[in-house]
Image: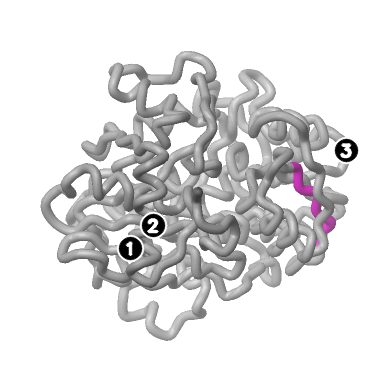
Amino acid sequence: MLGPMTAYVCPNCQVHSPTDALTWCCPKCRGPWDLEFTPAPSSLPSLPSLASRVNSLWRYAEALPPMPYGTEVTLGEGRTPLVPLTDSVSAKLDFLMPTLSFKDRGAVMLAAHALRLARAGVLDRVVADSSGNAGTAIAAFGARAGLDSLVYVPEGTSPKKLEQIRAHGARVVEVPGDREATARAAREAADSPGTFYASHVYNPYFLHGTKTYVYELWEELGGRLPDTIVVPVGNGTLLLGAALALDELHRQGLTDNRPALVAVQAEAVSPLAAAFHAGADDIDGPAPSHPTLAEGIAIPAPPRARQILRAVRETGGTFLTVTEDQIRTAQRDLAARGLFVEATGVACWAAVGANPPRPGLTVVPLCGAGAKTGLAR
């Protein structure tokens, strides 16, 4: 038996699909799924009750999509430190996750769901695509769950990231071309029978994992939230997870402040920033892209663009962009403060340095370890 299930729903077409189906996108518009799941009223844990809970994402089990007993895959992820950088800016050190990036938050949920399907005889293998960090996370949590994983990456991906993916037992397919070519190759593979597409973009279980970033902030700050949450955005998985958490915490009456979500893109690849400042509700096709040190957010045509733009506007946030020189400077500045972070992961600190923070507390995520890619040149 599969146990408790929710349903996939297309946010554009309202088409529904059971989550035990391996259909990875809406069959009508080919867009990504959302999950028809909302925590039950008054079901979220109180702050005092969290003190004795497991030290992983599953400490927020009531806020997460239901899983059958025994499928709660974990490597002790989450609960990353919140460290002050200035009087008004703190950094959440998500590069201290088990695979050294925030992508572990979503990979936990994808692996748990895939394990449920595997035990029910629904799937034989897991396929993912990534510029490196998501693939590493899927490989690691897939290994923890005993799943057969295949990870597609762009040709030229950091050798350290490839080594890490392979170390977890996943097979790697290097695809000539850019990040989008890699995604197309993975989607073709995902259409094979018995294949689960563990997409951090198309599968909404990933977003329900990343929302724990905000739940941890809420817990760390004693039931309050920062005034501003700055997030790097490529495909928008951390930002959309944050937006889910903000809605849930507010709806349950667990916080009285609503932070602004400030999204950061590399100037070299910034389709969402351009659309936002033009007042558009969506992007107008793939954006021109240029080489950037922030490879993890270099996404010319994010499939959830409309949702990302709406989420930022609803919180009164904005989009900022950073140059390559600002990224280099920010990486060295953080290293001088004792924090070695990969180039994509320093984008938010670069943006805050170039734009005076809003009043109150601002939190930036440091999303990936510098050991994965080295110092930007």
Around disc 1, counting alpha carbons within 10 Å, would you say few (fewer than 14), some (14 to 19), or many (20 or more)? many
Residue 43 seen in render: yes
| Residue 228 vertical placement versus 186 (above, below) | below
- The secondary element bearing badge 2 is classed as strand
Residue picked out by circle 2: 365
Q: CA distance from mark 1 to mark 2?
A: 6 Å
Give the answer, above or below, for where 179 lies relative to 251.
above
Real-space Cα separation, disc 3 to disc 2, in angstroms: 38 Å
Say which residue label 1 marks: 91
Q: Secondary structure at mark 3?
A: loop
Q: Is residue 101 above or below residue 12?
A: below
| Circle nearer the N terminus (1, 2) | 1
- Please state the horizontal and vertical placement of residue 6, each as a whole percent of the image: 60, 47
Horizontal side of residue 295 vs 73, given as left or right: left
Identify which residue is drawn at 26% across, 69% down: 84
Question: In terms of depth relative to the viewer, which is nearer, 162 or 49?
Answer: 162
Q: Mark 3 sits on what residue?
A: 193
Q: How would you classify the magenta stretch by its main secondary structure? A: strand
**Residue 160 is drawn in which quadrant?**
bottom right
Residue at 51% in and 19% down: 288
